[in-house]
């Protein structure tokens, strides 16, 4: 099944999807300012704004009755690209542990590949688990704390974020196995 068969072009104009697209468009500037020690406040504001778009897009889509295939595909990609890019930049500049960056990228690439396999083989778009949403929130807080205060502020939050991260890793893996075995009836967007 081709992606063009799933997505209605009008979905690009939904306010929730415009927020998701704006998150992706803000990413280069956010990463640029994260590299600059003299622009840390600007990076902090941009990172907070980009993650605020994530907090708003889902509720707006549900309230307006505009939960879309485009949003179900684009939103998790935008989240993962933003969090993983921020982790790489924070590892380079603010002492965020490289092992944590590696785990994040490994998990997120796995989730995206599994989602593509399910889409291709089952013609179904998988949706986020609550533990995945909690992980995104926790990692956003971690990134903001590392950006604002380095390891001293961010490390305790990172260790706390490993709990939902680990749970989501197991849940996504288990759900993928169930879907591929046809034991799990694919759910709709929450």
Image (cartoon, rainbow, N blue to C red):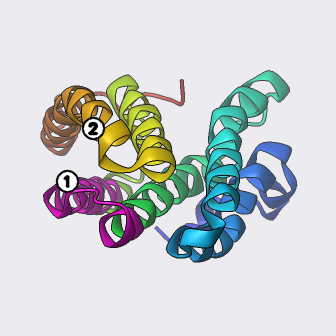
Please give the residue where the numbered disc 2 appears in the rendered image. Answer: 158
Q: Is residue 107 magenta?
A: yes
Q: Number of labelled discs?
A: 2
Name above or below for residue 36 compared with residue 61: below
Residue 89 falls in which quadrant of the image? bottom left
Region of the chain picked out in magenta, as a range: 89-115
**Disc 1 crowd, CA 10 A, few/some/many (<14, 14-19, 20+):** some
Q: Is residue 4 visible?
A: no
Q: Is residue 190 visible?
A: yes
Left or right relative to 14: residue 45:
left
Q: Identify the mark nearer the N-term, 2 or 1.
A: 1
Badge 2 marks a residue whose secondary structure is helix
Residue 111, given in percent of the width and then of the height, sits at 28, 53
Please give the residue where the numbered disc 1 appears in the rendered image. Answer: 100
Name above or below for residue 7 compared with residue 139: below
Task: Look at the numbered discs 2 and 1 and tell me whether their residues touch, using CB distance below 8 Å.
Answer: yes
Residue at the image position 57 percent from the left and 50 percent from the top: 75
């Amino acid at each position: 099944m081709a992606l063009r068969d799933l997505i209605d072009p009008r979905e690009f104009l939904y306010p929730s999807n415009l927020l998701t697209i704006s998150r992706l468009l803000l990413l280069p500037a956010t990463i640029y300012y994260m590299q600059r020690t003299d622009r840390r406040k600007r990076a902090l504001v941009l990172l907070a704004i980009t993650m605020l778009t994530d907090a708003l897009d889902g509720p707006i889509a549900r309230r307006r009755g505009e939960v879309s295939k485009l949003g179900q595909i684009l939103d998790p990609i935008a989240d993962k690209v933003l969090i993983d890019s921020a982790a790489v930049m924070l590892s380079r500049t603010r002492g965020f542990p490289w092992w944590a960056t590696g785990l994040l990228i490994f998990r997120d690439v796995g989730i995206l590949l599994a989602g593509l396999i399910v889409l291709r083989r089952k013609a179904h778009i998988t949706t986020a688990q609550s533990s995945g949403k909690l992980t995104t929130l926790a990692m956003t807080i971690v990134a903001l704390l590392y950006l604002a205060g380095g390891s001293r502020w961010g490390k305790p939050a990172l260790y706390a974020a490993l709990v939902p991260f680990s749970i989501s890793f197991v849940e996504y893996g288990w759900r993928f196995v169930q879907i591929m075995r046809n034991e799990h009836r694919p759910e709709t967007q929450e």
